[in-house]
C-alpha cells in the first residue's frame, strides 16, 4: 500500500498542490506547496553544474516530492537569469553555466506534469503580491538583495515581464555612473552598490583601513566571508560594520526611489539573503528613499517592507504561478 499523501489528506484538505523549485547560483530549493502558500515538504540540494544535468536533477526532485504527495498538479520553477516567457527558455544565467536551455520543455517531458519556468525574482514577487497571508498587492515592486540584486514587478495583479520575459532587471538600474564596475560590465548598477557582493567589497576595504576594529578582529578569527562577518559585527554594535550597512542601504534607497518614481505601486518589498539583516539594511534604505523619491509630500510614497516569505519566496511563488496557469488552462476549456 502506498504511503504517498494526497490532496485529501488531513491538514491539506481540498487545497490544490504544486511543486515549487527555486534554482539559485549555489543551491536548489524545492517544496510541495498548497494553494494557500503553505510549504508541506521541502528539500535543498547544491545547484547542478551544467544545463544538461539540470533537467535531470529537477526531475529527480519532482519524483521524490511526488512520492510523498501524489496529488501534485503542476510544477513551477523560478530560475536566476534571463528566462524567455512563456517558453521557459533560459538564455543565460549569470552565476551558472546554463546557456540556451529549454528547461520548461525538458522538465515537462521528464515529469509528465504541466510545467512553467520563469525568472526567480518574478516568482518571488508573485508570492509577495498574491500569496502573503496579511493581504496581497495588485501593484508591487519586489527587490531581492543577495549575492546580486534582482527584482520583479507586479502591475494590475499581473507580472510585468516585458515583450519576451526579460524585463524588470532591477539590479542593473544605474544609480551611480561613477561607481564600481558591476559583474555585467557596466558601472554603478544597483547590484554593484547594494548587494552582498558590494557588502563583501566594502567589508574587505574596511578591514584594511580599520585593522583594530571589531570587524577586523572577527575576520582574523574566522574563515567566514567578510560580508557575513559584517552582519555579526554590526549586531555587536561595531560602528565600522554599521556604517557598511548604512552605505549599501543608502544606495538601495536611491534605487527604490527611482522605482517608486516610475511605478505607482502599493509597496516595495525587499527580500533575499542580505535583507535578512532586517533594520540594519532597511532603516538606512528608508531614510535614503524618503530623501530621493519625487514629490513625497504631495502624493505620498509606498512603504518599503521586508519580505514575508524570506528565502522561501521563490519556491512559494513558482508553485503558485504553476497553479494559476493550471486554473487558467481549465477555465479556457
Image (cartoon, rainbow, N blue to C red):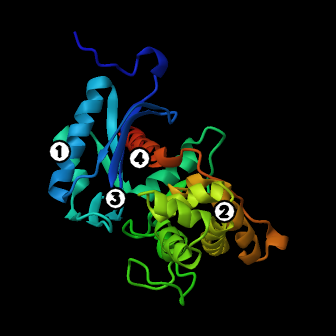
Tell me how far mark 3 sits from mark 1, CA to CA.
Answer: 24 Å
Q: Earlier in the sequence, mark 3 or mark 2?
A: 3
From this view, report whether residue 316 is shown above or below residue 24.
Answer: above
Q: Is residue 161 left or right of residue 52?
A: right
How packed mark 1 is, by other alpha carbons closer than 10 Å (few <14, some 14-19, many 20 or more), is some
Residue furthest to the right: 297
Circle 1 SS class:
helix
Q: Earlier in the sequence, mark 3 or mark 1?
A: 3
Mark 4, residue position:
318
Q: Nearer the viewer, residue 18 or 270?
A: 270
Tell me how far mark 4 sits from mark 1, CA to CA.
Answer: 18 Å
Mark 2, residue position:
238
Tell me how far mark 2 sits from mark 1, CA to CA.
Answer: 53 Å
**Between tags 3 and 2, which lies in front?**
2
Q: Is residue 69 left or right of residue 222?
A: left
Mark 3, residue position:
25
Q: Are marks 2 and 1 in contact (CB under 8 Å)?
A: no
At a point 51% along the width and 54% down the height, the residue shown is 125
Mark 1, residue position:
109
Which quarter of the figure is the N terminus placed in?
top left
Amino acid at each position: 500500500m502506498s504511503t504517498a499523501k494526497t490532496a485529501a489528506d488531513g491538514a491539506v484538505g481540498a487545497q490544490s498542490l504544486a511543486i515549487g523549485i527555486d534554482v539559485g547560483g549555489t543551491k536548489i530549493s524545492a517544496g510541495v506547496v498548497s494553494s494557500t502558500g503553505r510549504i508541506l515538504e521541502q528539500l535543498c540540494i547544491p545547484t547542478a553544474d551544467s544545463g544538461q544535468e539540470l533537467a535531470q536533477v529537477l526531475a529527480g526532485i519532482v519524483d521524490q516530492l511526488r512520492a510523498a504527495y501524489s496529488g501534485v498538479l503542476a510544477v513551477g520553477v523560478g530560475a536566476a537569469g534571463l528566462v524567455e516567457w512563456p517558453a521557459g527558455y533560459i538564455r543565460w544565467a549569470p552565476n551558472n553555466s546554463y546557456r540556451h536551455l529549454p528547461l520548461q520543455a525538458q522538465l515537462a517531458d521528464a515529469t509528465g506534469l504541466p510545467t512553467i519556468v520563469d525568472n526567480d525574482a518574478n516568482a518571488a514577487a508573485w508570492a509577495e503580491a498574491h500569496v502573503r497571508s496579511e493581504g496581497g498587492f495588485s501593484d508591487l515592486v519586489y527587490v531581492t538583495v543577495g549575492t546580486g540584486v534582482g527584482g520583479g514587478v507586479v502591475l494590475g495583479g499581473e507580472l510585468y515581464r516585458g515583450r519576451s520575459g526579460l524585463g524588470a532587471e532591477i539590479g542593473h538600474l544605474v544609480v551611480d555612473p561613477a561607481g564600481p564596475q558591476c559583474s555585467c560590465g557596466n558601472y554603478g548598477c544597483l547590484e554593484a552598490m547594494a548587494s552582498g557582493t558590494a557588502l563583501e567589497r566594502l567589508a574587505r576595504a574596511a578591514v584594511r583601513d580599520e585593522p583594530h576594529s571589531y570587524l577586523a578582529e572577527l575576520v582574523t578569527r574566522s574563515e567566514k566571508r567578510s560580508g557575513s562577518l559584517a552582519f555579526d559585527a554590526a549586531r555587536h554594535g561595531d560602528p565600522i560594520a554599521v556604517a557598511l550597512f548604512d552605505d549599501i542601504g543608502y544606495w538601495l534607497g536611491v534605487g527604490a526611489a527611482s522605482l517608486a518614481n516610475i511605478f505607482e505601486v502599493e509597496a516595495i518589498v525587499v527580500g533575499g539573503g542580505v535583507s535578512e539583516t532586517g533594520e540594519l539594511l532597511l532603516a538606512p534604505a528608508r531614510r535614503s528613499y524618503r530623501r530621493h523619491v519625487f514629490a513625497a509630500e504631495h502624493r505620498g510614497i509606498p512603504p518599503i517592507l521586508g519580505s514575508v516569505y524570506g528565502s522561501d519566496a521563490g519556491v512559494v511563488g513558482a508553485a503558485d504561478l504553476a497553479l494559476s496557469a493550471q486554473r487558467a488552462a481549465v477555465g479556457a476549456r
